[in-house]
Amino acid sequence: MKPVRRMAESAVSVLTVAVLAFGALACGSTGETGRDDGPAATASGGAASRTAADGFRIGLLLPDSTAARYDRFDHPYIAQEIATLCPMCEVVYRNANQDPGRQEQQIDEMLASDVRVLILDPVDAAAIGPAVVRAKSRGLGVVSYDRLAAGPIDAYVSFDNVEVGRAQGEALLKAVEKSGSRGRGPIVMINGSPTDPNAEQVKRGAHAVLDGRVEIGREYDIPGWSPDQANTRAAEAFAELGADRVAGVYAANDGMAAGAVQAMRAAGLPGRIPLTGQDAELAAVQRILLGTQTMTVYKPIRPQARSAARMAVDLGSGTAVKAVRTVGNGTSSAIPAEIIQPTVVTAANVGTTVVEDGFWTIEEICAGDVRNACRAAGLT
């Protein structure tokens, strides 16, 4: 999402992500509805009399389709886990495509339908707070997924984001120090979106490792985790600092690493300096094998999806959510939470992490010009 695993910090950023839940209703059959746009479907039924055996609707709201994970993994995994726990439940899916206003509209559409529980990964964790309040006022349960939303949420599941940043920082520092004379130059930091609480936690973890041990020549917070803006900012940093002086690039996720690689290529740097990432996207795993990216952080989505499904079904059934820890978001200081540990992926352990987990197959990874690199890494 395994070599590096640590417990998460108990304090979580005030900015947050929400998952909104339950309106009324039940479904007559197992299933899933919804596309990336359009209003949520409606159905009849009384929430007070419904149980998991009867079935009910669960709204799933994901933030964007730019990152490969949401439509390829999170959405189908959550739907599968809900079908296992509640065969008569129905998943109503919407994707906001990085538009916070659109996501708020999608929530309101679900409030007007027979959705009983929402699983929400917000585009803007703070701005979504009023919509969470509206959902709760209508009696819905709210599971905050991946990012901790503002407002009166009922449960939260995510990864140890501070540890993600620490792992990235440690990998970058090790690679920079290994590079000898180049290791004495500055690095460039390309952080995630300023509206994403996870980005703040990841950045905090990275700074805890890097500060005082390497010069940070330029640092940027990239709205929407935009690869294009990461490319622009990296090129700007190389021009201002001198590309031949830059010792490494800290990119908070793989999408922005892809943008940074474009700027590195234009400056003649790919493969010559370290580059970090996060999410274990296919292109990033291939770059790692090819030597143009140093590492990524794999966050196993299946257990995250399983926890979110369990929380949503419990809320929809009127069962208390069980968790071994709690977090706070400014509205509540005791939100039941599950925090999952991340894993560092390098060329040395691709086979025992993302391949062994079934996240990517050898055939997917070792295509085209990556074949020889896969052979050298012992994957084929």
Image: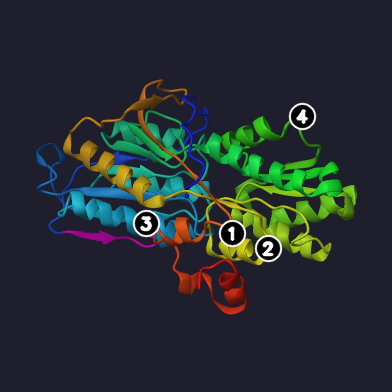
Residue underneath mark 1? 347
Amino acid type, residue under disc 1 in the picture: Ala
Q: How far apart in space, not on screen, are marks 4 and 3 (Cα)?
A: 41 Å
Amino acid type, residue under disc 2 in the picture: Gly
Q: Is residue 211 visible?
A: yes
Total numbered labels: 4
Task: Please tell me which of labels 2 and 3 falls first in the chain.
Answer: 3
**Closest to the observer, 168 or 129:** 168
Q: Position of residue 217 (x, y in %)?
A: 82, 41
Q: How dense is the environment of label 1, judged by Cα within 10 Å: few (below 14), some, or many (20 and up)?
A: many
Residue underneath mark 2? 291
Q: Are marks 2 and 1 in contact (CB under 8 Å)?
A: yes
Q: Is residue 267 above or below residue 311?
A: below
Q: Secondary structure at mark 3?
A: helix
Q: Is residue 126 above or below residue 343?
A: above
Q: How far apart in space, not on screen, are marks 2 and 3 (Cα)?
A: 31 Å
Checking the image for residue 201, the label placed there is none
Task: Please tell me which of labels 3 and 1 falls first in the chain.
Answer: 3
Q: Residue at x 78, y 60 (%)?
A: 264
Amino acid type, residue under disc 3 in the picture: His
Residue underneath mark 4? 212
- Compared across the picture, whether 371 is left or right of 54 comes to right
Q: How far apart in space, not on screen, are marks 2 and 1 (Cα)?
A: 8 Å
Q: How far apart in space, not on screen, are marks 1 and 4 (Cα)?
A: 28 Å
Location of residue 210 (image quadrant): top right
Q: Is residue 130 above or below residue 38?
A: above
Task: Please tell me which of labels 2 and 1 falls first in the chain.
Answer: 2
Q: Position of residue 193 (x, y in %)?
A: 61, 43
Q: How dense is the environment of label 2, judged by Cα within 10 Å: few (below 14), some, or many (20 and up)?
A: some
Residue underneath mark 3? 75
Task: Please tell me which of labels 1 and 4 falls first in the chain.
Answer: 4
